[in-house]
Image: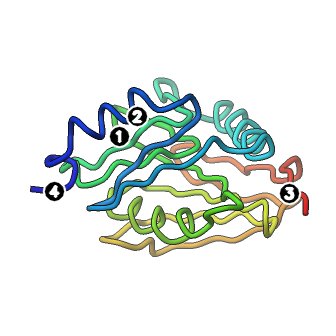
Amino acid sequence: MGFYEKHRHFVEDLQRTAPEGVRIEWSGDTLIIQAAPSSIHQLNVGLVQRQFEQHAPAGYLFGNDSAVASSDMAMARVPDLSCLAADEAVIAVEVVSKSNPGNDWMDKLRDYAVMRIPLYLIIDPRQQTVTLFSEPNHDEYHTRSDRKFGDRIRIPEPFGFELELDTLVPYGD
């Protein structure tokens, strides 16, 4: 029996009573609680979401801070932005936080591949980079594409467009 099954009521109570903006996620036996993101973080999420919405096929739904769970409930992650089709996540988008970059670059990178989410987009305002991972297999993605703020990055089907990165905002010092 995994963490979620053992502590389901505790996790659900925590999610229900957490202050607005606080994220509660789990991966295996690890419970992750994060504070509300910064305004620059949220601005970048919104800028990217608007572009995705213009290119999403009919019937696709976007969620901000909505939990995405694995089918066996061994983990649930809360991407900054996700797009769902037929109750399956098609892409997870994360804006790297200043306080815990390893969560997005290591833990979520592994977990989203395990969850077989086809596309994982990381926006890193610290480094002014954007990275797209695709082709998940077990606990890793086989394809990686890196760009700098100001460039464009090709987002494959089912979206099929060039994501403009020139409006993204880096973190200040």
The residue tagged 1 is 88
Which of pointers 3 and 2 lies earlier in the amino acid sequence?
2
The residue tagged 4 is 2
Q: Nearer the viewer, residue 116 or 33?
A: 33
Q: Nearer the viewer, residue 109 or 132?
A: 109
Kindly give the residue lying farthest to the top in the view shown. 59
**Residue 37's image quarter?**
top right
**Residue 13's image quarter?**
top left
Name the kind of residue labelled 1 in the image: Glu
C-alpha distance separating marks 1 and 2: 5 Å
Residue 170: numbered disc: 3
Marks 1 and 2 in Cβ contact (< 8 Å)? yes
**x 43%, y 66%: residue:** 135
Kindly report which numbered mark, 1 or 4, lies closer to the viewer in this rendering. Answer: 4
78 to the left or right of 172: left
Query: Residue 133 location in percent, x, y?
Result: 54, 65
Q: What crowding class fits label 4: few (fewer than 14 Cα within 10 Å), some (14-19), or many (20 or more)?
A: few
- For the image, the number of numbered tags is 4
C-alpha distance separating marks 1 and 4: 22 Å
Q: Nearer the viewer, residue 154 or 165?
A: 165
Say which element carries label 1: strand
Say which element carries label 2: strand
Q: What crowding class fits label 2: few (fewer than 14 Cα within 10 Å), some (14-19), or many (20 or more)?
A: some
C-alpha distance separating marks 4 and 2: 27 Å
